[in-house]
Amino acid sequence: MNESLAARIAQVRFDSSRLQSGYDMSEVDWFLDQLEEKVRSEEPIEEFLAGAHFRPVKLREGYDIAQVDGFIEEVAALVKLESSAPAATNPTTPGASVPRASQPEAPGVATAPAPARDAPPSVVEEARGPLRRLFGRLGR
């Protein structure tokens, strides 16, 4: 499941909002990079997901708040499902299917620590820059 979840995190796309409030794109991208890294290294991510917080932006492009919150809650539900599944029906076994979490009626606000401004951007951060946001949507 870790590889499939990591791939889902790496491939997720959110709609952008300009005239409405949205989450700061760089903070969400940083959070997703860290989340993917933790999933691939099999670190526990429950606390990281629970501590997510993003700054809302109004006068510049941001990610759709409901979509980001819904995705984080979906990942949290999958992690909870995997940890509570008995060994015989564990979704990480080959051929097992993982049910998708339903979208909540009123998504909570997700939060993540702001990325360190002193650190050089990683390859993943550079790939999620403005060009990827622009050209990444062409394949939809």
Image (cartoon, rainbow, N blue to C red):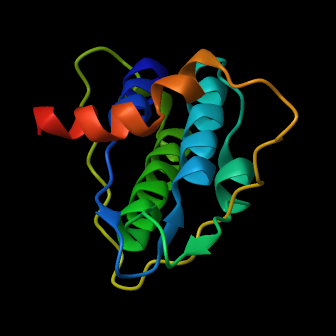
Quarter of the figure with residue 93: top left
Q: If the image is split into quadrants, where does the N terminus sit?
A: top left
- Of all residues shown, which one is farthest toward the right? 118
Would residue 59 be found to the left or right of residue 70 on screen? right
| Mark count | 0
Front in this rendered view, residue 4 or 34: 34
Residue displayed at 36% across by 32% down = 132
| Residue 66 image point, x, y percent | 38, 72
- Observer able to see residue 91: no
Would residue 82 be found to the left or right of residue 41 on screen? left
Would residue 119 be found to the left or right of residue 124 on screen? right
Front in this rendered view, residue 48 or 79: 48
Q: Is residue 80 above or below residue 86?
A: below
| Residue 112 image point, x, y percent | 70, 56
Q: If the image is split into quadrants, where does the C terminus sit?
A: top left
| Residue 29 image point, x, y percent | 54, 43
Would residue 78 be found to the left or right of residue 31 on screen? left
Front in this rendered view, residue 36 or 121: 121
Residue displayed at 22% across by 18% down = 95
| Residue 19 image point, x, y percent | 34, 80
Q: Is residue 83 above or below residue 28?
A: above
Residue displayed at 63% across by 41% down = 30
Quarter of the figure with residue 96: top left
Residue displayed at 63% across by 65% down = 54
- Observer able to see residue 26: yes
